[in-house]
Image: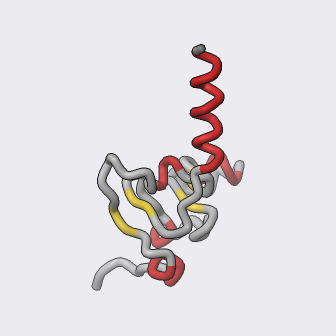
Amino acid sequence: MGSVTLKAKQQHSYKKYPASSERLCVTCNFYVPDLRQFMRDEASVSEPRCAMLGLKSAPAYRVLPDHGCDAHDNSEYMARLERRAKEKE
């Protein structure tokens, strides 16, 4: 028996993307790199989660930085990059 796939992951077409893709979870506004710090709860797992797909501690909610989905939104990430570029000028 394999792992359980969340319905939300199927609905948003969550899958692995090439490293050069602009749709990676690690660049998304919904990406939470460490659930323990986000929830401020020592009982939570220290794994990445997606606020769009769910922030529960179950393994089915785990997301990987080199994956992505249709709900990807990196507007905050792009704004940060623009600010850094302006600071270097």
Q: Quadrant of the C terminus?
A: top right
Q: Position of residue 35 (x, y in %)?
A: 60, 53
Residue 54 in the figure: left or right of residue 16: right
Q: Position of residue 28 (x, y in %)?
A: 55, 53
Q: Nearer the viewer, residue 72 or 37?
A: 72
Q: Nearer the viewer, residue 23 or 43?
A: 23
Q: Residue at x 48, y 48 (%)?
A: 26
Going by the picture, which residue comes out furthest to the right?
Answer: 40
11 over 73 or under it: above or below: below
Q: Position of residue 74 (x, y in %)?
A: 57, 51
Q: Residue at x 42, y 79 (%)?
A: 5
Q: Position of residue 80 (x, y in %)?
A: 63, 35
Q: Quadrant of the N terminus?
A: bottom left
* Residue 67 image-quadrant placement: bottom left
Q: Residue at x 58, y 57 (%)?
A: 73
Image coloring type: secondary structure
Please give the count of numbered marks on the rendered protein. 0
